[in-house]
Amino acid sequence: MWPRIGGLRTLALGTPGELRTSLNTLVLNGVKTATAGLLDEYATDGEELEHIGERLVLVDDHDTLVGVVQVTDVQACRFAEVPWDFARAEGEGDRSIEEWRAGHAAYWARIGTPVTDDTQIVCVHFRLVSAGDGGIATGDLST
């Protein structure tokens, strides 16, 4: 299971360190409004897919809240069929869908989960609800 904060699942982008810090900054600046995951990881971790309206706690390397996002869309598709509009919404500077695929394939290979064209990818779109604790850490995060 993924860690929870205030009853909400956490969203830990990338790998700890410089990558996670960079991705979190993109979210907090409104540039990154989507993220991709591997469908197989959900089953391995005993988690369901995100659902529209769900709020997730964006965390840093220490699982500390840095923001809250709300899911606006969730789609699963083959790696080879991830659309350019989704890749662009990830906000990571890719100039084409081919560049996005190459970068993501290299990332997943580095962390020990190589992908093929047929690998199922979960494409999650979200919007930033709150940056920092925003006074909500002690409140009801689920509304």
Image (tube, rainbow, N blue to C red):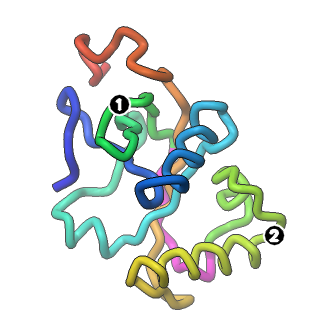
Q: Position of residue 5 (x, y in %)?
A: 22, 32
Residue most toward the front? Answer: 17
The image quadrant where one finds the N terminus is bottom left
Residue at (81% x, 69% y) in the render? 96
The residues bearing labels 1 and 2 have C-alpha atoms spaced at a distance of 32 Å
Q: Nearer the viewer, residue 62 or 41?
A: 62
Which of discs 1 and 2 lies nearer the camera? The answer is 1
Q: Most extreme residue toward the right, as rendered?
A: 95
Foreground of the two, 47 or 104: 104
Q: Tag 1: residue type?
A: Leu
The residue at the point 29 percent across, 21 percent down is 141
Residue 53's image quarter? Answer: top left
Q: Is residue 127 above or below residue 93?
A: above
Q: Which mark is residue 65?
A: 1
Give SS at disc 1.
strand
* Number of other residues with Cα within 10 Å of mark 1, as a class: few under 14, some 14 to 19, many 20 or more: many
> In the rendered view, would you say 77 is above or below 23?
below
Magenta stretch: give its range.
Answer: 73-81
For the C terminus, the quadrant is top left
Asked if residue 80 lies in the magenta stretch, the reply is yes
Residue carrying label 2: 96
What percent of the width, then of the height, locates residue 66? 42, 30
The quadrant holding residue 136 is: top left
Q: Is residue 126 left or right of residue 38?
A: right
Left or right of 94 on screen, residue 74: left
Magenta stretch, main secondary structure, is: strand
Location of residue 16 in the rendering, given as x and y in whole percent from the top left corner: 41, 55
Image point (32%, 34%), residue name: 64
Q: Residues within 10 Å of mark 2 (few under 14, many from 20)?
A: few
Answer whether residue 14 is magenta in the image: no
- Give the vertical position of 30 relative to 32 (above or below): above
Image: 46 above or below 141: below
